[in-house]
Amino acid sequence: MGQTETRVPQRGLTFEDVWAALMENREQMKETERRFQETDRKISKLGSRIGQLIEHFAASNIIEKFRALDYHFTQISRNHTIEDEQGNFLAEIDLLLENGNCAMVVEVKSLLTRTDVKEHRKRLETLRRYADKRSDTRKFAGAVAAALMNKDARNFALTSGMYVVEQTGETVQIKAPETPCFW
């Protein structure tokens, strides 16, 4: 004799089932977003620390190195912000070396690219316009510093008339362009 199977009809999903699943998914998404934001903050903080470390290495004996190239800077400042008379942001300078006649504007990067060099040239042009409006007749020279840079970015900076500051062990080395450019 054969056994008879009794089938229980499966009930379909109800609105309440779907809604509960959506609410659970929503809570999981909120938790995931919170974790992403926390990770983002940690990465940003780490990136900031790395940037500070690279700036520290670049600044460590940069005045003495430029003195060997016949620049006699008397002061150095970090993270110098330039604003116009209305308080609008114009530029940020990572390292600013100054004396009465000249200012060396140094852009510091962890990895230098051609785009960074182009942006630094624009920054120098902005600074020149700002200085002209204020009757500041100092010459502005440009330099780029980086923990890492490829040959293309280095050569582009040099042909753009900028000095190149590279980390070499415990100190920095400065390569001068054939024809320095002044803004």
Image (cartoon, helix red, strand yellow):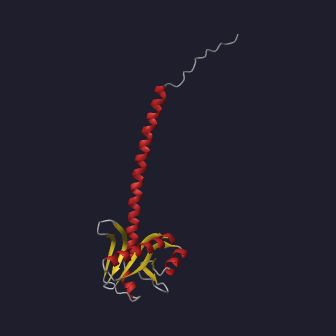
Based on the displayed image, in which of its 4 quarters is residue 123 positioned? bottom left
Closer-to-camera residue (91/57): 91
Residue 103 placement, left or right of 175: left
> Is any atom of residue 113 visible in this view?
no
Based on the displayed image, in which of its 4 quarters is residue 11 positioned? top right
Q: Residue furthest top?
A: 1
Q: Residue furthest front?
A: 133
Q: How many marks?
A: 0
- Please name the residue shown 37% across and 72% down the image: 93
Percent x, y of residue 65: 40, 84
- Please name the residue shown 50% across and 69% down the image: 115
Closer-to-camera residue (118/39): 118
Residue 153 placement, left or right of 6: left
Closer-to-camera residue (154/8): 154
Based on the displayed image, in which of its 4 quarters is residue 57 positioned? bottom left
Residue 102 vertical position relative to residue 124 in the rendered view, above or below: below
- Please name the residue shown 37% across and 84% down the image: 64
Percent x, y of residue 169: 45, 77
Assign the C terminus to one quadrant of the image: bottom left
Residue 49 vertical position relative to residue 31 in the rendered view, above or below: below
Percent x, y of residue 125: 41, 75
- Please name the residue shown 33% across and 85% down the image: 101
Closer-to-camera residue (128/161): 128
Percent x, y of residue 152: 55, 75
> Is any atom of residue 138 visible in this view?
yes
Assign the N terminus to one quadrant of the image: top right
